[in-house]
Amino acid sequence: MLPRPGRYRVERGMTFCFGFFELEVLFFQEIQKQKYMYQTGTSPKSGWVYILSNKNRTVLYIGVTANIRGRIHNHRNGEGSKFAKKYNLTDLMYYEWYDRIGEAIRREKQFKEWNRQWKIDLIHTTNPDMNDLWETLWE
């Protein structure tokens, strides 16, 4: 039996069952969000905290972003922050992902209060050779 014509109140993720057919209702914004997540490998509500360094590993930079691939690409091309450009900070040393951007911002502020050795120790937990992790973002 098919539904009668008319207006129906629908909510995000609501599923209708019409005999053997199921129609999942997704709003246009949800479709746009899914496209964004597919294209960038991230979510607009999620966040990343990252640490950059220069070739000699003498300077560290801590940042936060919703799109880590795009942000690191900007840093590598000299279009990121003025600080990163001044000290040629192009190598990604460390990164963390969070479901919510607010959590990532809190973590960034926490990192910025740490002394240098604590940051280096953190990097060594996942990247003991201090290699550039740029390529791992695409795996």
Image (cartoon, rainbow, N blue to C red):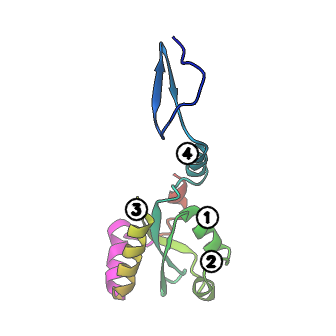
Asked if disc 4 and disc 3 are in contact, CB closer than 8 Å, the reply is no
Residue at 32%, 77% (x, y): give it: 121
Q: Residue furthest front?
A: 6
Residue 76 position within the rendered picture, expressed as x and y whole percent measured from the top left: 63, 73
What label sits on residue 98 in the rendered view?
A: 3
Question: Dot 1 lies on which element?
Answer: helix
Asked if disc 1 and disc 3 are in contact, CB closer than 8 Å, the reply is no
Instruction: Give above or below for 35 relative to 4.
Output: below
Res 83 → quadrant: bottom right
Earlier along the polypeptide chain: callout 3 or callout 2? 2
Asked if disc 2 and disc 4 are in contact, CB closer than 8 Å, the reply is no
Residues 109 and 45: in front is 45
Earlier along the polypeptide chain: callout 1 or callout 3? 1
Give the Cα separation between the discs numbered 3 and 2.
21 Å
Q: Mark 4 — residue? A: 30
Instruction: Give above or below for 2 relative to 61.
Output: above
Residue 65 position within the rendered picture, expressed as x and y whole percent measured from the top left: 52, 69
Comparing marks 1 and 3, which lies closer to the viewer?
Answer: 3
Please tell me how crowded label 1 is: few (under 14), some (14-19), or many (20+) other residues with Cα within 10 Å: few
Q: Mark 1 — residue? A: 70
Instruction: Give above or below for 67 relative to 14.
Output: below
Question: Dot 3 lies on which element?
Answer: strand
Residue at 52%, 55% (x, y): give it: 42
